[in-house]
Image (cartoon, grey):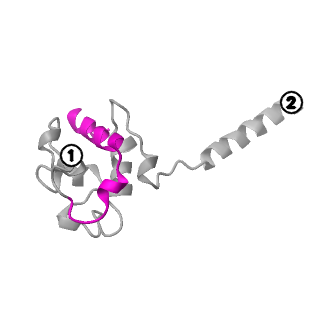
């Protein structure tokens, strides 16, 4: 292999390594930004719920406050009736809580969420609450 090709290969390997090491870990609610449409469960919904609701003493697999776990698609869809009603955001308890129609008894939920989060969650439910 010519000397120039070796340099190109090592440069590409170095770039690939740096890209793999860069962190896109979501740690704060503001790190999650919902698109106007085609909301993804794994791209926006689960990361949003993980950093706002499924942590600490709240809706994790261990604590499951009020019997609600917000840690996986199946727990969100099937642990509590009407938590999510696909294609019907007005009937979905989680949307009612996010929009302030129903009160959330503990924590500072409303201080941690933005209008984009509320619209995005509503849009995901309106789009059928898909496991995508």
C-alpha span from label 2 to label 1: 58 Å
Q: Which residues are magenta?
A: 104-132
- The x, y position of residue 104, in whole percent, is 21, 59
Q: Work out whether residue 18 can be spotted.
A: yes
- Of badges 2 and 1, nearer the viewer stands 1
Q: Are marks 2 and 1 in contact (CB under 8 Å)?
A: no
Q: Residue at x 46, y 47 (%)?
A: 31
Q: Is residue 81 left or right of residue 112?
A: left
Q: Is residue 4 left or right of residue 126?
A: right
Q: Which residue is tagged 2?
A: 4
Q: Is residue 115 left or right of residue 31?
A: left
Say whether residue 130 is magenta.
yes
- The x, y position of residue 42, in whole percent, is 36, 44
Q: Is residue 84 above or below residue 54?
A: above
Q: Residue at x 31, y 61 (%)?
A: 108
Residue 10, disc: none
- The x, y position of residue 75, in whole percent, is 23, 55
Q: Which residue is tagged 1?
A: 95
């Amino acid at each position: 292999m010519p000397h120039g090709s070796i340099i190109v290969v090592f440069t590409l390997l170095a770039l690939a390594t740096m890209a793999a090491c860069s962190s896109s870990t979501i740690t704060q609610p503001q790190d999650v930004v919902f698109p106007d449409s085609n909301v993804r469960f794994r791209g926006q919904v689960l990361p949003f719920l993980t950093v706002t609701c499924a942590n600490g003493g709240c809706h994790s697999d261990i604590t499951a406050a009020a019997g609600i776990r917000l840690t996986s698609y199946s727990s969100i869809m099937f642990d509590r009736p009407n938590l999510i009603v696909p294609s019907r955001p007005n009937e979905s308890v989680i949307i009612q809580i996010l929009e302030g129609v129903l009160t959330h008894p503990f924590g500072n939920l409303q201080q941690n969420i933005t209008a984009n989060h509320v619209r995005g969650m509503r849009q995901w439910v309106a789009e059928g609450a898909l496991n995508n």
